[in-house]
């Protein structure tokens, strides 16, 4: 019996490792709050996977003035050279508020998660001109669509009329839908 339990544990370990990756988006989809973000287009097609839309969101180009004075003092020295494998990442928590159209806009950036409200966790990259670029993770980058609809969505994004519907929970985000005005 003892020998069987060792084999069972050896078999269970790889399965556990494989199941950890989808837990975060599943939790966000179950418990998250729905928000809307404005988008920017990148690319509409993958020959192997079909139509998809690679998106950038307008909140990814952050305004440094949204940082609190205390947090701004702690950020200098973070550059592209320090965001390599093996170095610790710096994260900012971006607070969001919906505007009159219902599109969430950033209202502040902090090094610690806020106590309440809607916020997203983002990895920080700063270029040599001290411009902040935020990376909100893999689940906001690509959205797969029905065949032959990728170009239409890309054109809508170019016109500024494509909105991403995102579920947010504890700073994590998952893109659930894309909306175009009728």
Image (cartoon, grey):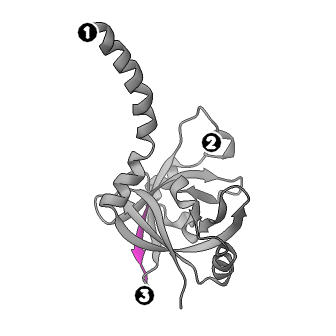
Residue corresponding to mark 3: 100
Q: Nearer the viewer, mark 1 or mark 3?
A: 1
Residue pictured at 60% horizontal, 58% vertical: 132
Disc 2 packing (10 Å; few <14; some 14–19; many ≥20)? some
- The disc placed on residue 1 is 1
Stretch of the chain drawn in magenta: 94-99
Q: Which residue is mark 2?
A: 83
Residue 55 or residue 133, whichever sits in front: 55
Query: Is 35 displayed left or right of 123 in the figure?
Result: left
Above or below, 84 relative to 32: above
Would residue 5 appear left or right of 37 to someone viewing this image?
A: left
Q: Residue at x 34, y 53 (%)?
A: 27
* Disc nearer the start of the sequence (1/3): 1
Verify whether residue 96 appears in magenta: yes
Compared with 11, 100 (above or below) is below
The picture places residue 118, in percent across and down from the top left corner, at 36, 66
């Amino acid at each position: 019996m003892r020998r069987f339990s060792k084999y069972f544990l050896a078999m269970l370990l790889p399965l556990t490792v494989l199941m950890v990756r989808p837990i975060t988006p599943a939790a966000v989809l179950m418990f998250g709050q729905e928000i809307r973000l404005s988008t920017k287009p990148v690319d509409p097609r993958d020959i192997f996977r079909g139509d998809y839309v690679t998106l950038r969101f307008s909140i990814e180009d952050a305004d440094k003035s949204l940082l609190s004075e205390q947090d701004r003092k702690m950020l200098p020295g973070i550059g592209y050279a320090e965001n390599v494998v093996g170095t610790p990442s710096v994260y900012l928590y971006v607070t969001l508020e919906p505007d009159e159209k219902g599109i969430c806009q950033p209202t502040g950036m902090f090094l610690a998660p806020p106590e309440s409200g809607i916020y997203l966790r983002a990895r920080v990259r700063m270029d040599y001109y001290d411009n902040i670029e935020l990376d909100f993770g893999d689940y906001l980058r690509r959205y797969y669509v029905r065949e032959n609809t990728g170009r239409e969505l890309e054109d809508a994004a170019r016109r500024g009329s494509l909105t991403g519907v995102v579920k947010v929970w504890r700073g994590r985000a998952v893109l659930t839908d894309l909306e175009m005005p009728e």
